[in-house]
Amino acid sequence: MPSAEPSNPYMDKAYKEAGRKQLPSPKRVLFRPLFNTVGGGLSADIYLPSSSVPASGYPVAIYIHGGGVVIGDTQGILRAAHQAAHLLAAGIAVVSIEYRLQPHVTTSEICGDVMYALEWVRGQRGPGLAGAIGAKVDGERVAVWGHSSGGQLSSWLGLSANPPLRAVIDGFGYNVCPLDLKNETPALIEARNKVLPLPAASSTKDMDDDSWINSPDQGERDRLAYAKALFAVGNTIPEGFPTPLDDPYSLASTVKSSPPFLILHGTADEAVPLAISEKFHDAMIKNGHDSTLVKVEGAGHGWKVEKGGEGRLGERWEIDEKAFKWFAEKILA
C-alpha cells in the first residue's frame, strides 16, 4: 500500500491561486436577499463559456463548496478549477453558490438555501440565472457537484430535486450522518456563544488563510475561531441532521428515482472516512439508484492534479478528466 499523503492536500493556497488563472472572471450576483445575513443574502459566482448560447439556452452545472458547513465561500471552486474549465469548454455554464453557514441555521435551512439556488438557476425564483446573465438558460439540463460538505449537499440536492437533475458528482461528502449528533466541549460552547449574536454568514475565509487571525473584524476572528474549535473535536456537522429528510443516506432508501451519481473518495481520507462513501454507495445500489464509486488510491480529503504530471498528479488528472467527461455528457444528453 503506498504511503498516505497529508490529510488535506486540497487545502493549499498556492494551488487555489493557480486555479484562478484557469477560469474567466466570474459575474457575481445576489440571488437570495436575506435579512440579518452578512452581505445582504446569498450570492453566486457565474462563469460563462466562450461559445455562443445554444438555441435551447445554456446548460448549467452548480458547484457547492465545502467547509463543514461552517466555513468557505464561492471561491472554493478555484481548487476545482480544472473541473470547472472542462465544463466551460463543453459549453456548460458554471455557477458557484453560497449558502448560510452554521451555527446560525439548521441543516434543513442550509438544504433550503441550495434548493433555492437550483430554483433560481431554473428561473423559478425571480428573474433567475437567465435574468442575471441576459441569456437563455436550459432549466432541464442542470447538474450539481461539490466537495466535502458540498458533496454531501450535492447528494441531498440530487435526491430531492424535482424535476430531477441530469447528474451528481459527490466529492468525499459526509453522506451518512447520525441524526442526534452531540459533541460539545467548553471551548466549543464558548466559541459558539460569541458567534451566535452576529448576523448569519454565507462566506468566510479559509482556515489556511492566516490573515483572519489578525483581522480588524472581530466577527471574522470569532467565526474562524469557532470553526477551529469545532474541527478540534472532530465534529464537522455541528447541528447534525434534524430529520431523515436532510440525510442523503436516509433519502437513498425512500426516494424512488434519482439522477446518476458518481462518488469520488480518497482511500486515505482522515476527515471523512472512505467507509462513509462506501456505505452510501451500497445503499444507493441496494435501492435501485444509478451510482458509481471511484476510490482514489492514497488520496486524502481532496487531491491535487496536474495534466501530464508525474505519478499520482497525472493519474488523478486522468481520473478527474474521465469523471468530468462523463458529467458533461450527462448534462448535454
Image (cartoon, rainbow, N blue to C red):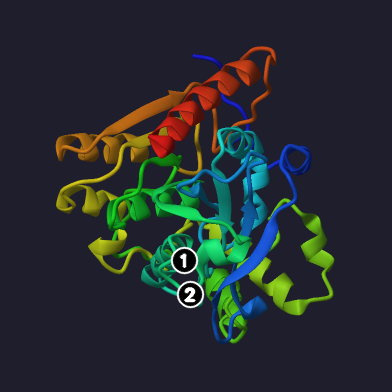
* Residue identified by numbered label 1: 120
Which of the 4 image quadrants contains residue 139? bottom left
Element on which disc 2 rests? loop
* Residue kind at label 1, given as amino acid type: Trp
Amino acid type for the residue under numbered disc 2? Gly
The crowding category of the residue bearing disc 2, from other C-alpha atoms within 10 Å (few below 14, some 14 to 19, many at least 20), is some
- Of the numbered discs 1 and 2, the one sitting upstream in the chain is 1
Q: Tell me: residue 323, above or below residue 41.
A: above
In front of the other: 169 or 13: 169
Q: Which residue is drawn at 55% across and 86% down?
A: 35
Q: Residue 284 lies in what quarter of the image? A: top left
Residue 176: x, y in percent? 32, 49
Question: What is the total number of numbered labels drawn onto the structure image?
Answer: 2
Whole-percent x, y for residue 95 in the image: 57, 53
> Residue 20's image quarter?
top right
Q: Can residue 169 be seen in this view?
A: yes
Residue marked by disc 2: 126
**Relative to 127, 50 lies left or right:** right
* Residue furthest front as drawn: 55
Q: Is residue 247 above or below residue 146?
A: below
Distance from disc 1 to disc 2, alpha carbons, whole Å, reads 7 Å
Image coordinates for residue 86, horizontal then vertical, percent? 59, 32
SS state under label 1 = helix
Q: Which of 267 and 56 is in front in this view?
A: 56
Towards the viewer: 209 or 286? 286
Disc 1 + disc 2, Cβ < 8 Å: yes
